Amino acid sequence: MMIFKKAIPRRTFLKGAGVAVALPMLDSMVPAMAAVNDQGKKPLRVATVFMPNGRIMAKWTPRTDGKGFEISPTLAPLAPYKDQLLVMTGLNIKAADAVGNEPGGVHARPAGAFLTGIHPKPGGELGISMDQLIAREWGKQTQLGSIEIALDAPEMAVTDGSYGAYYMNTISWSTPKTPLPMETNPRVVFERIFGEPGSAQQRKARLARQRSILDSLAEDTRDLERGLGSRDRSRLSDYLDNVREIERRIQQSETRNVAETAAPEAPIGTPDNFGDHVALMFDLAAAAFQADVTRVFTFMMSRELSQRTYPQIGVTEQHHSVSHHLNNADKMAQMVKINVYYAGMYTKFLEKLRAMPDGDGTVLDHSLLAYGAGMGDPNQ
């Protein structure tokens, strides 16, 4: 048997003026002999999503009969994914325990040990985190080794006793003494993934022109589409529409922030609304997975000791305060509301991945996603 069919290279980019946008997995990228030589094997992705201040464990841990489990109240938003869900119980990060008379660190140690399993020391010494160990290998095949994002801007004043702020602002470490900064601005993340970098002044100039980076790709896109089948053309169109929608939302935030003279410190591109900020970051990560720009994504949804309030769900007391609930029923109910709210936002990320075709399955089918916290019962 002789097969001459050629495949589009997996690392094909659409190119425009100063822009290079990676493509999602297309049927045309799978060699004709893939079924024989396994060259069409789909990439695997790993994402870690961290939320702070623990859980109400009785509402988090599912009941089980040894054969299966019931979805618990806090995990209720994840019910549609029960058949793909594994809930780990009985875990104990011993490395987060205090050693001797170390002052403070009650929140810093669980954050630092979450992906390292290593005891964080006062003064900033830890170890390589799990995500970065994976990125060292998988990053050899992708444009970016990994993406690290957060929602709280770094703040060196946020310390925990003798533990510096490096343990509070990131959960990713590339070496024992190198905490990785976690990007909070969606515009910066967008430009890392899709190109068009520049200074804040340059970004403002582009904003004034209101010109999408995708506009400069039109000619290259038309050239590519001529050689694609109908299914690939549809998949490419959906992908570019998704990228354009993400960019539109960022531009909308930028326009609002530039106009808001009362809040000049707001970084360009960062939504004022917490839920919008979360959604944008998750959508950027999903697009990066879809285009195989990176296979490793780490998201710190909020830092330990977070003082954030959530009036949108009826919680006006600070997150950290209600986590030390002293078994007060009202505070425990508020803590459960926060936990369910976070699970709901995470579930929308899963929905996005499940809607993205990837070979014979979806991006979700070819991903390993870890969602959790560095501590269990915060009341202790």
Image: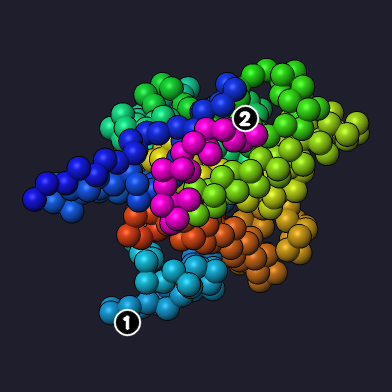
Instruction: Name the mark on residue 216.
Output: 2
Q: Is residue 232 highlighted in magenta? A: yes
Instruction: Evaluate whether residue 73 shows in this view.
Output: yes
246, above or below 139, in the image: below
Q: Secondary structure at mark 1?
A: loop
Give the color scheme: rainbow, by chain, secondary structure or one colour.
rainbow
Q: Secondary structure at mark 2?
A: helix
Rendered residue at 53%/38% (across/down): 221
Q: Identify the amino acid type marked 2.
A: Ser
The dominant secondary structure in magenta is helix
Q: Is residue 328 left or right of residue 357?
A: right
Q: Is residue 79 left or right of residue 5?
A: right
Q: Which sits in the foreground, 60 or 296?
A: 296
Lower position in the chain sequence, tag 2 or tag 1? 1
Residue 341, percent from left and from top: 63, 62
Quadrant position of residue 250 = top right
Q: Residue furthest left?
A: 1
Residue 179, percent from left and from top: 46, 26
Residue 263, percent from left and from top: 85, 33
| Residue linked to disc 1 | 65
Residue 275, percent from left and from top: 68, 53
Q: Badge 1: how crowded within 10 Å, few (<14), some, or many (20+)?
A: few
Region rendered in magenta: 214-233
Q: Residue furthest bottom?
A: 65
